[in-house]
Image: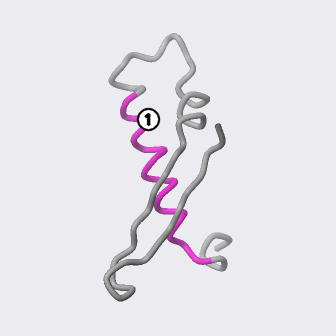
Amino acid sequence: MDNYLIKTLAYNKQARILFVENTDLIRAVCNHDHMNKLLKTSLGKTVSVASMLTGILKGTQRTD
C-alpha cells in the first residue's frame, strides 16, 4: 500500500478536509526494536501531523 494524502474542501470552500494514509511511512520510521511504545506512538503522531501540515502548503511555500 502506498502513502497518500487526499485534500478536499467542504461548506462552500470554508473547511478543508484531509485524509492521510501513511501507515507504511510510520512503520519505516518506527521500525526500531529499542524504541518503547510511548516513543513510537509520539513519533507516529508527529509524522502524521507533519504530513498533514505539508499537505496544506502551496507549491512555493514548500521550497522556502
Q: Position of residue 39 (x, y in %)?
A: 38, 26
- Residue type highlighted by circle 1: Leu
The residue segment tinted magenta is 41-58
Question: Looking at the picture, does residue 40 appear above or below residue 35?
Answer: below
Question: Looking at the picture, does residue 63 appear above or below residue 24?
Answer: below
Q: Residue at x 36, y 19 (%)?
A: 37
User: How many labels were placed on the picture?
Assistant: 1
Q: Is residue 8 left or right of residue 59?
A: left
Q: Position of residue 50 (x, y in %)?
A: 48, 53
Q: Residue at x 39, y 16 (%)?
A: 36
**What secondary structure do most residues of the magenta stretch adopt?**
helix
For the N terminus, the image quarter is top right
Q: Position of residue 35 (x, y in %)?
A: 46, 17
Q: Is residue 62 left or right of residue 20?
A: right
| Camera-nearest residue between 7 and 61 | 7
| Camera-nearest residue between 33 and 6 | 6
Q: Is residue 52 left or right of residue 39?
A: right
Q: Residue at x 54, y 72 (%)?
A: 57
Most extreme residue toward the top is 33
Q: Position of residue 44 (x, y in %)?
A: 44, 36
Q: Residue at x 64, y 74 (%)?
A: 64
| Camera-nearest residue between 18 and 45 | 18
Question: Looking at the picture, does residue 12 appear above or below residue 23?
Answer: below
Question: Looking at the picture, does residue 46 appear above or below residue 64?
Answer: above
Check if residue 42 falls in the magenta segment.
yes
**Which residue matches tag 1?**
43
